[in-house]
């Protein structure tokens, strides 16, 4: 992980994560959503690396966030 990613991860772990949980997102949902906010367009692997959410769980979390209308997904082939 490069220095910039470490700094982003530290910021992710602070206020944004807590605020999203206060709005009703689960722990993993808030971490994944915050990572997407910081990264913009990202792969599941990138979300996993920044958020700390296990990669097998990222796919289900992204589906839940899509159903809530918080994100739009695009599958890669």
Image (cartoon, rainbow, N blue to C red):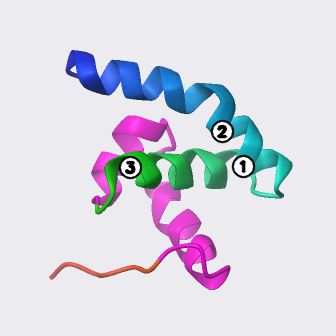
Among all residues in the image, which is located at the extreme left?
77
**Within 10 angstroms of label 1, few (less than 14), some, or many (20 or more) residues?**
some
Mark 3 or mark 1, earlier in chain: 1
**Residue 24 spot, x, y in % from top left:** 83, 58
What is the C-alpha distance between the residues marked 3 and 2?
14 Å
Q: Nearer the viewer, mark 3 or mark 1?
A: 1
Circle 3: element type: helix
Q: Which mark is residue 20?
A: 1
Q: How many marks?
A: 3
Circle 2: element type: helix
**Residue 12 spot, x, y in % from top left:** 53, 32
Mark 3 or mark 2, earlier in chain: 2
Whether 73 is drawn above or below 36: the answer is: below
Whether 2 is drawn above or below 49: the answer is: above
Pointers 2 and 1 in contact (CB under 8 A)? yes
Label 2: which residue? Answer: 17
Is residue 47 within the magenta segment?
yes
The residue at the point 63 percent across, 38 percent down is 16
Q: Which residues are magenta?
A: 42-71
The residue at the point 49 percent across, 20 percent down is 10
What is the C-alpha distance between the residues marked 2 and 1?
5 Å
**Within 10 angstroms of label 2, few (less than 14), some, or many (20 or more) residues?**
many
Pointers 3 and 2 in contact (CB under 8 A)? no
């Amino acid at each position: 992980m490069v220095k910039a990613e470490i700094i982003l991860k530290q910021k992710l772990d602070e206020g944004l994560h807590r605020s999203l949980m206060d709005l009703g997102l689960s722990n993993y949902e808030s971490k994944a959503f915050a990572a997407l906010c910081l990264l913009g367009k990202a792969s599941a692997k990138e979300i996993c690396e920044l958020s700390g959410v296990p990669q097998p769980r990222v796919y289900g979390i992204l589906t839940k966030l899509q159903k809530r209308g918080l994100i739009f997904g695009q599958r890669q082939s």
